[in-house]
């Protein structure tokens, strides 16, 4: 049995010296089935925060998705099965979510300098390291004044792209943070188990990495030829930076054939967005 909790969709942000950082906290694991959803009697809250019971008699993931979006067009759903949390976004591919394993990183704009949205990682089944990464982010309410106040190096009034990486530590009780809460000391730098050794590798201070840092050059083209040239957590280096459109939004996806395996993921992993 499980319960369903609906709440307005949120966003997140983080900062590090010399850059503007946005953090999405530890990722809830997606590991459910349509049958689990169908067999659940769910207690939920509406968009105004009032509790109600939703009888879920849906026969398919798609029909559950349609039901949720019809009832709460501007909401997201957090589904609890035991201690596993699943975040379902109206408009997202719910069928893929409930039949695949993955993780979702949520950015809560109220805590992240105005950046709102999610990054979803789904293991697509063609091997333990092949993952589809889907980003749906809204940068239109980014608080540039707060960014400049936090870091004097941020002087560009028109930020056109954002780097993003998996960091290995999380010390906040919140699922999103910004600025000082995303510092190197608190988030532990980029996930880099094979020691590709970029300047922000989790092993950057080791002798082995110090000898390699200056030659680090991770780009999508180089990564496609040799995955070892990139830190596993250097997502923008591997697949590209976030580039908001004219409406300051990002909605896109990539397939990474060498994403960290499900077993490598830890509850402390987070995604930080840098500008």
Image (tube, rainbow, N blue to C red):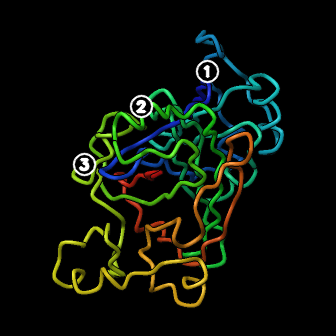
Percent x, y for residue 215? 36, 85
Percent x, y for residue 254? 67, 66
Q: Which numbered mark, 1 or 2, is in the foreground of this view?
A: 2
Identity of the residue furthest to the bottom in this view = 225
Q: Which quadrant of the structure image shows residue 88?
A: top right
Residue that appears at 40% across and 37% down: 148
Percent x, y for residue 156? 50, 46
Give whichever of discs 1 and 2 has the lower sequence position: 1
Q: CA distance from mark 1 to mark 3?
A: 34 Å
Give whichever of discs 1 and 3 has the lower sequence position: 1
Question: In this view of the protein, which residue sits in the foreground, 153 or 92?
Answer: 153
Q: Which mark is residue 186?
A: 3
- In the displayed structure, would residue 133 be above or below residue 89? below
Residue that appears at 54% across and 41% down: 157
Q: Is residue 272 rendered to the left or right of residue 95?
A: left
Query: Which residue is the site of mark 2?
Result: 146
Label 2 neighbour load within 10 Å: few <14, some 14-19, many 20+: few
Residue that appears at 58% across and 55% down: 161
Q: Which numbered mark, 1 or 3, is in the foreground of this view?
A: 3
Q: Can you say which quadrant of the picture contains the N terminus?
A: top right
Q: How many marks?
A: 3
- In the displayed structure, would residue 190 be above or below residue 114? below
The local secondary structure at tag 1 comes to strand
The local secondary structure at tag 3 comes to helix
Q: Which numbered mark, 3 or 2, is in the foreground of this view?
A: 2
Query: Which residue is the site of mark 1?
Result: 44
- In the displayed structure, would residue 113 be above or below residue 192? above
Percent x, y for residue 141? 59, 31
Residue that appears at 21% across and 80% down: 210
């Amino acid at each position: 049995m499980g319960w369903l909790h609906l709440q307005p969709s949120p966003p997140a942000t983080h900062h590090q010296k010399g850059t503007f950082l946005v953090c999405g906290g530890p990722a809830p694991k997606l590991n459910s089935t349509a049958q689990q959803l169908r067999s659940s009697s769910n207690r939920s809250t509406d968009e105004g925060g009032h509790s109600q019971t939703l009888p879920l008699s849906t026969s398919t993931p798609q029909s559950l998705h349609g039901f949720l979006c019809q009832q709460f067009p501007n909401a997201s759903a957090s589904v609890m099965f035991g201690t596993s949390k699943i975040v379902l976004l109206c408009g997202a591919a719910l069928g893929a979510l409930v039949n695949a394993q993955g993780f979702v990183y949520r950015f809560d704009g109220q805590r992240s300098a105005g950046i709102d949205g999610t990054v979803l990682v789904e293991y697509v089944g063609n091997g333990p390291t092949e993952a589809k990464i889907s980003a749906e982010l809204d940068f239109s309410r980014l608080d540039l004044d707060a960014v400049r106040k936090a870091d004097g190096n941020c002087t560009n009034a028109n930020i056109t792209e954002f780097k993003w990486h998996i960091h290995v530590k999380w010390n906040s009780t919140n699922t999103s943070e910004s600025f000082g809460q995303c510092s190197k000391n608190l988030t532990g730098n980029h996930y880099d188990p094979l020691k590709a050794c970029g300047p922000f590798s989790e092993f950057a201070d080791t002798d082995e990495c110090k000898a390699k840092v200056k030659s680090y050059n991770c780009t999508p083209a180089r990564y496609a030829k040799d995955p070892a040239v990139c830190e596993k957590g250097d997502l923008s280096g591997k697949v590209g930076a976030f580039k908001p459109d004219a409406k300051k939004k990002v909605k896109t996806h990539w397939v990474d054939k060498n994403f960290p395996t499900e077993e490598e993921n830890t509850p402390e992993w987070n995604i930080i967005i840098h500008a």
